[in-house]
Image (tube, rainbow, N blue to C red):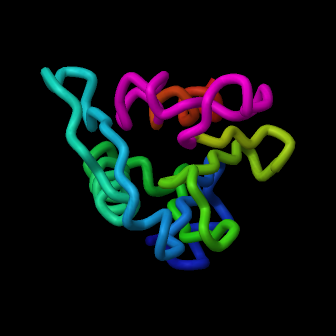
Amino acid sequence: MSDNSSAHSAQVQFSLCLQKDCARRGVALKISPHESAPTELTGLDLQQRLQTLIEKKRMAAVVDVRETSCMRGCRVGPRLNVVVGGHFQEAVRYLHLPANRRHGRCVAWADVDSVESLLEQYVGKTLD
């Protein structure tokens, strides 16, 4: 997790729900698009892997990872909100919900190629 000083300069904010239910739920994701198969990650695992990837790619100046919470008893976790440029209107939510229950800014985890490509997709928007 970043400290508050880097949060103010970050252009992309990843808010990961770490409420008890979200943190325990898992999602099958690849960290790198080069991995042959996805790995089952809990919310806590995802937080650690995302932070490690940001450090490895030296993106800490533009990406902030912070903990958030959602409704108690959440059945859609782990939930990740991505906010670009500090505007919540541009937020995208990644979660477990069938297509008929999601609105346009919600994306199913199944549609995510890898954590790395997700990160580069949003950081690329800020660097254009």
Q: Residue furthest left?
A: 36
Does the magenta segment cover residue 19? no
| Rendered location of residue 44, percent (x, y) | 35, 65
Q: Give the quarter of the figure containing the N terminus.
A: bottom left
Residue 111 versus residue 87 in the image, above or below: above
* Residue located farthest toward the right when viewing the structure as drawn: 89
Q: Of residues 114 and 124, which is closer to you in this image?
A: 114
Q: Quadrant of residue 122?
A: top right
At horizontal 61% and vertical 62% (from top left) the residue drawn is: 74
Q: Nearer the viewer, residue 108 or 35?
A: 108
Horizontal placement of 122 versus 43: left or right?
right
- In the image, which residues are magenta? 95-118
Q: Residue at x 61, y 37 (%)?
A: 97
Q: Nearer the viewer, residue 7 or 1?
A: 1
Q: Position of residue 53 (x, y in %)?
A: 30, 48
Please tell me whether residue 94 is drawn above or below residue 80 in the rendered image: above
Count the marks: 0
Within the magenta stretch, is there residue 102? yes
**Quadrant the C terminus occupies:** top right
Residue 113's spot in the image, x, y percent?
38, 22
Residue 5 located left or right of residue 48: right
In-image side of 76 versus 56 (left or right): right
Q: Position of residue 91 (x, y in %)?
A: 74, 43
Seen in the picture, residue 51 relative to 121 is either above or below; the reply is below
